[in-house]
Amino acid sequence: EADTIYQKAQTFLENKKNSEIDIPEVRYIKGLIRKGEARATSHFVGLTDDQIHFMELPFYETGTIEKKPIGKEDIQLTIDLIEKIKPHQIYAAGDLADPHGTHKVCLDAIFEAVKALKPKPFMDDCWLWLYRGAWQEWGIDEVEMAVPMSPDQVLAKRHGIFKHQSQKDGVVFQGTDAREFWQRAEDRNHETAALYQELGLATYAAMEAFVRWHY
């Protein structure tokens, strides 16, 4: 079965035109690569397979850069996962400067799911924290939780990013910044720590900043 998928994907890619959408087999292989990378990072930070969930939201499955608008099924799948885990904290990418734009759709699904779940008792103890990725940081006046990082933790984060091999050397959706993703993320964390130092707080190697979404 694997050989059949491989042969079909290879034949398609050898003859693919620029405007042509990837066939399901190629999208399946790309998905396997990204899942493998995400799983490798999760294992690196100490998670086990039963703590890793791949949602495979329908909006993403277009085969093109442009994704579908968020739908009821996307929201319901998000509701189901939150209800299953009953987390105390949810961390989501609030990086709406991402030139790819997928973060915005995912965030909308999480917002709608959290609003729908608000009456549930476990949600009284559940906080939604938004972080930003490589493109920009929260304004220092917006930050509601700042997590200091030691040099060892900065290095661990870099190694975690390195597990995402397909995204590491020249990001697919680069934007106007020529630095690699890990360099941008690291510089952003260093700059945040430097700002807190200028404000008279303790000196740290880096700092990760979060804003809480109040629902």
Image (cartoon, rainbow, N blue to C red):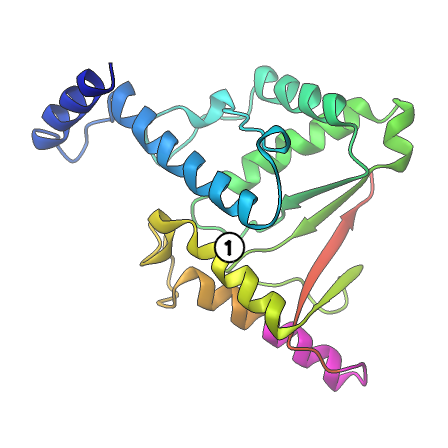
Task: Please tell me which residue lies in front, 135 or 2.
Answer: 2
Q: How many marks?
A: 1
Q: In the picture shown, does residue 45 fall above or below 181?
A: above
Looking at numbered disc 1 in the image, what kind of residue is underneath it?
Gly
Residue drawn at 61 percent across, 63 percent down: 137
Query: 10 Å neighbourhood of mark 1: few (<14), some, or many (≥20)?
Result: some
Residue drawn at 29 percent across, 19 percent down: 24
Magenta: predominant secondary structure element?
Answer: helix
Task: Please tell me which residue lies in front, 30 or 139.
Answer: 30
Task: Please tell me which residue lies in front, 51 or 74.
Answer: 51
> In which image quadrant can residue 90 be found?
top right
Q: In the picture shown, does residue 210 fall above or below 108?
A: below
> In which image quadrant can residue 14 be found?
top left
> In which image quadrant can residue 201 be found?
bottom right
From the top left corner, tell me how far across and down residue 23 is, in percent: 24, 21
From the top left corner, tell me how far across and down residue 61 is, in percent: 41, 24
Tell whether position 207 is magenta: no
Residue drawn at 81 percent across, 85 percent down: 200
Residue drawn at 60 percent across, 50 percent down: 45
Task: Please tell me which residue lies in front, 81 or 37.
Answer: 37
The magenta-colored residue range is 190-202
* Quarter of the picture holding the N terminus: top left
In this image, 5 relative to 105: left or right?
Answer: left
For label 1, the SS is: helix
Q: Which residue is mark 1?
A: 160
